[in-house]
Image (cartoon, rainbow, N blue to C red):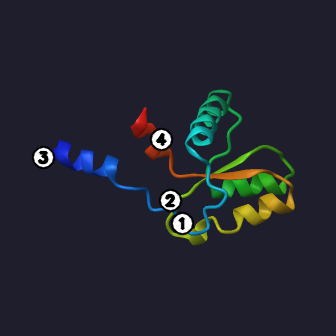
């Protein structure tokens, strides 16, 4: 019974936020998540809205990767604006969990 539910979850499309643009394609998403994994291993990754916003305001540069399935959306709506003001590139990925299921 548990395997049927898991199979349904894998087939179900990810509910993306309407503001999730630019959304990474399959190839870019895979490369981006690989980059995130490497950054995590190198201990140079900022996670969470508070930590990312603080880093942007301090003037740190890098790439901002935002999950496209965030709920509620209000939590991250200001992050792309901050990135644009600071000339920091950002990209939305469907979700971290969605890509891990495919591997």
Whole-number angstrom distance, CA of label 2 to CA of label 3: 27 Å
Q: Earlier in the sequence, mark 4 or mark 1?
A: 1
- State which quarter of the image contains the C terminus: top left
Query: Circle 2 is placed at which residue position?
Result: 69
> Considering only vertical position in the picture, is 96 above or below 57?
above
Q: Earlier in the sequence, mark 2 or mark 3?
A: 3
Residue nearest the viewer, comparing 28 with 60: 28
SS for dot 4? helix
Whole-number angstrom distance, CA of label 4 to CA of label 3: 24 Å
- Name which quarter of the figure residue 102 lies in: top left
Q: Residues within 10 Å of mark 2 (few under 14, many from 20)?
A: some
SS for dot 2? loop
Pointers 2 and 1 in contact (C-beta within 8 Å): yes
Q: Earlier in the sequence, mark 3 or mark 1?
A: 3
Q: Residues within 10 Å of mark 1 (few under 14, many from 20)?
A: some
SS for dot 3? loop
SS for dot 1? loop
Q: Earlier in the sequence, mark 4 or mark 3?
A: 3
The x, y position of residue 18, in whole percent, is: 56, 69
Whole-number angstrom distance, CA of label 4 to CA of label 1: 17 Å
Query: Circle 3 is placed at which residue position?
Result: 1
Query: Circle 4 is placed at which residue position?
Result: 99
Query: Circle 1 is placed at which residue position?
Result: 17
Pointers 2 and 3 in contact (C-beta within 8 Å): no
- Name which quarter of the figure residue 43 lies in: top right
């Amino acid at each position: 019974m548990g395997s049927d539910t898991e199979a349904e979850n894998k087939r179900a499309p990810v509910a993306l936020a309407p503001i999730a643009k630019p959304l990474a394609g399959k190839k870019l998403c895979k490369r981006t998540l690989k980059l995130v994994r490497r950054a995590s291993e190198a201990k140079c990754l900022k996670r969470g809205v508070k930590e990312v916003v603080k880093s942007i305001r301090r003037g740190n540069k890098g790439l901002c990767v935002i999950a496209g399935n965030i709920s509620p959306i209000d939590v991250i709506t200001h992050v792309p604006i901050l990135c644009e003001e600071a000339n920091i590139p950002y990209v939305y990925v469907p979700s971290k969990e969605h890509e891990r299921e495919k591997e």
